[in-house]
Image (cartoon, rainbow, N blue to C red):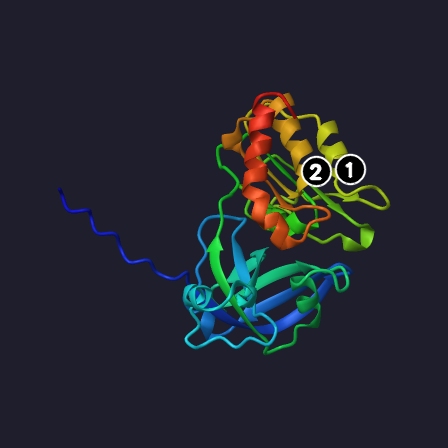
């Protein structure tokens, strides 16, 4: 029997340890936290505009051994004592000053990361994994569609800022109301079409706006993320009604109304794959 090829040893994901250097409430429902410190010395971004990191929140009352090793912790500690993780888009990375900016949606005491960001103080420590990513505006696209809710706003804003000169862009972001608008634009000055939710269900205004869009001719590069049910409707519109090839589309539900982050992450991949299969068969 031939010897089995030796597999490389598995290495733990890279953990970066950062400190809060400043915070700012940029709208009523969004807090910007800027991280820095020597622990970000090895942090690097690639070409994507939807780069994300996983923030690690220690379990209450649990102290982890140093040096911090997330894989060893998962091997040695019961699951309910593992650090909780939350995925957040990198809004900006200043390599020269080693500063990482993350924008957090905050709705009072709802959730884990939002309340933490609202209370964050200079010097607070945060461990994070990453970055990952998968989308950037395609330079050969004839036009670009960016659509989402508050959860997708940091990636949409970062994508707008990195658009090729002269790009044709239609950007839609659904938010609570006028006070939640932010200044952001492409290098040529194309900005976001702000959709005020008001008392309407989450996603209703976004689906309506994208459906009503007079699609330009040519190849589209689309980035569509946000609440899962809304994304499902937009996926059907783009894939089934508009015939956009999936290779030209970055789309998924960042969150799902009525589910905790943990519950949604547990089924997210399977749910997205099932929706894609159903829509390819014309069932949804």
Q: Is residue 232 left or right of residue 218?
A: right
Label 1, secondary structure: give it: helix
Q: Nearer the viewer, residue 185 or 19?
A: 19
Q: Nearer the viewer, residue 34 or 252?
A: 252
**Residue drawn at the location 62% of the way across and 77% of the way down:** 122
Marks 2,1: beta carbons within 8 A: yes
Vertical placement of residue 65 versus 266, above or below: below
**Residue 37: image x %, image y %?**
50, 74
Judged from this view, the residue extending furthest toward the left is 1
Q: Is residue 98 left or right of residue 148?
A: left
**Residue 54: image x %, image y %?**
53, 59
Identify residue for label 2.
230
**Residue 153: image x %, image y %?**
66, 50
**Residue 204: image x %, image y %?**
78, 37
Q: Which mark is residue 225?
A: none
**Residue drawn at the location 75% of the way across and 64% of the way down:** 109
Label 2, secondary structure: give it: helix
Judged from this view, the residue extending furthest toward the right is 199
Q: Rate crowding at label 1 as few (under 14), some (14 to 19) or many (20 or more) other CA atoms within 10 Å.
A: some
Q: Quadrant of residue 239?
A: top right
Q: Quadrant of residue 200?
A: top right
State the separation of the CA atoms marked 2 and 1. 7 Å
**Residue drawn at the location 63% of the way across and 31% of the way down:** 235
- State which quarter of the image contains the N terminus: top left
Vertical placement of residue 45 versus 25, above or below: above
Identify residue for label 1.
204
The answer to whether residue 32 of the structure is visible from this angle is yes
Q: Is residue 118 left or right of residue 242?
A: right
């Amino acid at each position: 029997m031939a010897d089995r090829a030796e597999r490389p040893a598995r290495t733990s994901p890279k953990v970066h340890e950062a400190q809060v250097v400043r915070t700012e409430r940029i709208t009523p429902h969004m807090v910007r936290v800027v991280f820095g410190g020597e622990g970000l010395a090895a942090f690097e971004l690639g070409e994507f505009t939807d780069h994300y990191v996983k923030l690690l929140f220690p379990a209450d009352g649990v102290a982890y051994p140093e040096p911090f090793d997330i894989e060893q912790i998962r091997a040695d500690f019961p699951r309910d004592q593992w650090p909780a993780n939350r995925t957040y888009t990198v809004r900006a990375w200043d390599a020269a000053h080693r500063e990482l900016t993350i924008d957090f949606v905050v709705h009072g005491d709802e959730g884990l990361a939002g309340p933490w960001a609202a209370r964050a103080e200079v010097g607070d420590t945060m461990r994070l994994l990453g970055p990952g990513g998968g989308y950037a505006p395609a330079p050969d696209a004839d036009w670009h569609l960016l659509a989402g809710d508050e959860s997708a706003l940091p990636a949409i804003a970062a994508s707008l800022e990195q658009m090729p000169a002269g790009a044709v862009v239609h950007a839609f972001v659904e938010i609570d109301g006028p006070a939640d608008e932010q200044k952001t634009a492409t290098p040529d000055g194309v900005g976001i079409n702000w959709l005020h939710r008001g008392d309407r269900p989450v996603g209703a205004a976004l689906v309506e706006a994208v459906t009503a869009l007079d699609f330009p001719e040519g190849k589209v590069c689309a980035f569509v993320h946000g609440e899962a049910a809304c994304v499902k409707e937009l996926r059907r519109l783009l894939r089934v009604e508009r015939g956009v090839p999936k290779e030209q589309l970055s789309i998924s539900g960042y969150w799902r109304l009525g589910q905790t982050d943990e519950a949604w992450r547990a089924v997210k991949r399977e749910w997205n794959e099932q929706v894609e299969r159903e829509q390819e068969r014309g069932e949804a």
